[in-house]
Amino acid sequence: MKLSIRPDAVLVQAVIAGALSFAHLHDLAQAAGQTGWKAWAYPVSVDLLLVAAWRRLRAQRSRLAWCWFVVALVASLGANIATAGFLDMNHPPALLRLGVAGWPALAFLGGTLLAHQHTDHTPDPAPAPEQEPAPRPVVAVDRPETPEPAPEIAEPEPVPALPKAAPGVPPALIDHARKVATDHRARTGADIDAATLRARLGLPEDLALAIVAQLT
């Protein structure tokens, strides 16, 4: 079985861009006085810090990772732009020499902080399995036997009560009852009866009947 290898356009473009950036950083470091293997180590240091910060950002979005990603990006982008003819590579400025000389310490600090940054990879706890509710025990209740109903006893017919004399109603109570009756008629549209007046004023039944009779 033959394996077909298809070149990935994105990978090819990344390799070309990386090679160009590597060459620019090497030329800049060499122009700043870094010769031999040191000039080749500068591109590795800058691009490796950029990749390390990006990997840390993918794992955990933190301000520290963002800070070193921006620092490495500015260093790489600035070095590539500087080789485009904006600087005299034969006589580089003192500030460029200072930045190139101090970069190893800065890159070492950034790499150490990124390597020792705490990342939380604790997986989410698995949901607890649902437990079926235990069946409730059936309690047997001893019910007593229903006794036989007692024979009905004929109650004597009530003796009709003598009519009570209508109690005297104070005029002040009649005036208050008239206000209550007027309010009841305004809300319901019907005249107030003795039961309602008795419930509203807390009067005895005979006194409520007497007041309703006077109101009507």
Image (cartoon, helix red, strand yellow):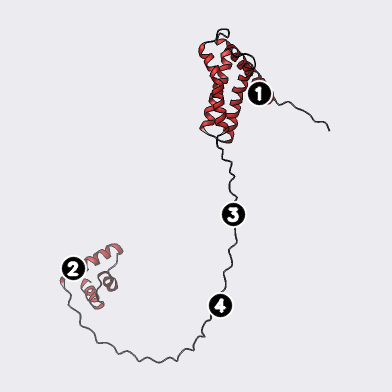
Mark 1 and mark 3 in contact? Answer it, CB < 8 Å: no
Distance between the Cα atoms at labels 1 and 4? 81 Å
Q: Is residue 65 left or right of residue 193?
A: right
**Residue type pointed to by label 4:** Ala
Query: Can you identify the residue that label 2 sits on?
Result: 175
Distance between the Cα atoms at labels 1 and 3? 46 Å
Q: Is residue 127 left or right of residue 198?
A: right
**Residue type pointed to by label 2:** Asp
Q: Residue at the location (16% across, 73% down)? A: 170
Distance between the Cα atoms at labels 2 and 3? 73 Å
Judge by depth and name the residue closer to the eye, 123 or 5.
123
N-term-proximal mark, 2 vs 4: 4
Q: Residue at the location (19% across, 70% down)? A: 174
Q: Nearer the viewer, mark 3 or mark 4?
A: 3
Splitting the image into 4 quarters, where does residue 115 fall? top right
Query: Can you identify the residue that label 1 sits on?
Result: 14
Splitting the image into 4 quarters, where does residue 103 fall? top right
The number of numbered discs placed on residues in the rendered structure image is: 4
Task: Classify mark 3: helix, strand or loop.
Answer: loop
Splitting the image into 4 quarters, where does residue 69 fall? top right
N-term-proximal mark, 1 vs 3: 1
**Residue type pointed to by label 3:** Ala
Q: Nearer the viewer, mark 2 or mark 4?
A: 4
Instruction: Specify the farthest residue to the left.
Output: 171
Query: Can you identify the residue that label 4 sits on?
Result: 140
Distance between the Cα atoms at labels 2 and 4? 64 Å
Judge by depth and name the residue closer to the eye, 131 or 113.
113
Judge by depth and name the residue closer to the eye, 50 or 33.
33
Task: Classify mark 1: helix, strand or loop.
Answer: helix
Rendered image: mark on residue 128: 3
N-term-proximal mark, 2 vs 1: 1
Q: Nearer the viewer, mark 2 or mark 1?
A: 1
